[in-house]
Amino acid sequence: MKVFKFGGASVKDADSVKNVAKVLESQGFQSCLMVVSAMGKTTNALEEVVDLYFKKEHYDGKIQEVKAAHIAIAQGLFRENHKVFGEIALFFDDIDSFLRRNKSPNYNFVYDQVVGCGEMISSIIISEYLNEKQFTNQWLDARDYIKTDDSYREGNVHWAKTEAFIKNLRPDVSYVTQGFIGSDDNNFTTTLGREGSDYSAAIFANCLNAEAMTIWKDVPGVMTGDPRKFEHTELLSCLSYEEAIEMAYYGASVIHPKTLQPLQQKDIPFYVKSFLQPEKEGTKVGHHNNREKAETYILKENQHLIRISTRDFSFIAEDHISQIFNLLARYKIKVSLMQNSAISLALCLEDKFDHTDEFLGELSGEFDTEIIRNVTLLTVRNSNPETAGIHYQNKNILLEQVSRNTVQLVSV
Ligand code: ADP
Ligand code: ASP
Ligand code: MG
């Protein structure tokens, strides 16, 4: 089987959904499992619903807004009175009645039950549309296949159970299912982390021993830098799994960082291609031995730079570091870069769950801390020493780390 993943940008409106059918026409849709994301910015809008709910503010208007956007898309795809309109309405009623009945104060749990609906609605619309256009497919509820623990908003996949369920799929059937979501042992919805649909596709690909996986994006493939942020970027036509893992790890958002490992483990060729130009080659990720490594740039914004030092001028020792990292793990704060000296530790942090103040509070008993919020981390891979000076221009650099083939600069 082959696995396709269509992200939010590729299904953001009715014309985009029609374009998905065109991509399938050019690529074939036999024995294909297709993973889809929520449409356009639906995930952000549903996040707002959850925020309003927890602030005890009116969330109904926002739900109606998201519902109207989906109905408008469906109107561009289906005849009046199609059953899909009833199905869409039912999903939004379910979100509303879940929030009315909910007693759980657990933000992350409520988040997953509500935000995961974006993928459910999107996959139903797309599956129905493709069936009408003779791309015969069976709709799957990914929560019956991808099993995770109950770490809401960051579910950890239970591989043995997941594989056992996915192995029941039939290679002679094509399927449409959701990215981003799974379920825990109590069958509550869990999500795999923002932008996690690439990872969902890789989980299916791994468990199906897929012949290939393709993610369809609004860019020609993996470029030397994000074309929205850097000028003069070029397409990387071949990438080794290792180089792709490194780029994703440092924050190249075109591929979710967890996506590569399940593919590499089974040697599954992986393509990143443009849904606007499906006939073009795009990027192939696999077992390449790239001798000439291209210089690549990765920008991570909204980071915090924290300096932690001992009060009594004693050294930052192993026990301090382990204490600090235990707290980081507890608050799910990710370290993008670290640098230590005798009496201080500098950390560039990514705090998706907004726990930095609590983290600093816990440290304040024993350490002095200093924070600069909203810094930017630029990572240059395979940096060319002759032209490296350019990365330092017009920047207030707060921290620099240079290793054999990677330069990292934190600046404001
Ligand atoms: P999806 O629709 O699947 O969610 P994303 O928006 O997550 O797609 O990923 C595509 C975006 O990734 C591009 O629009 C681009 O701005 C960004 N991007 C970041 N780094 C790169 C890179 N090195 N090459 C190409 N695109 C990149
Ligand atoms: N819809 C989810 C998000 O926007 C997952 C994904 O698109 O990959 O984060
Ligand atoms: Mg995305």
Image (spheres, rainbow, N blue to C red):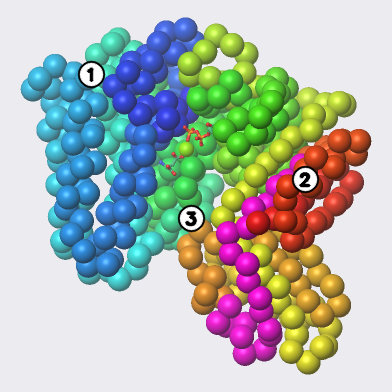
Front position in the image: 105 or 254: 254
Q: Which residue is mark 1?
A: 77
Q: Residue at x 85, y 42 (%)?
A: 389
Dot 2, how many residues are within 10 Å of its Cα: few (below 14), some (14-19), or many (20+)?
few
- Using a 10 Å C-alpha cutoff, classify the residue at mark 1 as few (fewer than 14 neighbours), some (14 to 19) or many (20 or more): many
- At 39% across and 53% down in the image, what residue appears? 190
> What range of the chain is rendered magenta?
360-380
Query: What label sits on residue 393 in the rendered view?
Result: 2
Give the vertical position of 339 relative to 400 (above or below). below
Amino acid type at image mark 2: Gln
Q: Are marks 1 and 3 in contact (CB under 8 Å)?
A: no
Relative horizontal placement of residue 64, taking residue 351 as reference (left or right): left
Q: Confirm or reject: label 3 Cβ below 8 Å from ligand 2.
A: no
Q: Which residue is mark 3?
A: 154
What secondary structure is marked by label 3? loop
Q: CA distance from mark 1 to mark 3?
A: 34 Å
Find out whether the residues at labels 2 and 3 contact each other: C-beta distance under 8 Å: no
- At numbered mark 2, what does the secondary structure look like: helix, strand or loop? loop
Sooner in the amino-acid sequence: mark 2 or mark 3: 3
Q: CA distance from mark 2 to mark 1?
A: 50 Å
The span from disc 2 to disc 3 (Cα, nearest Å) is 38 Å
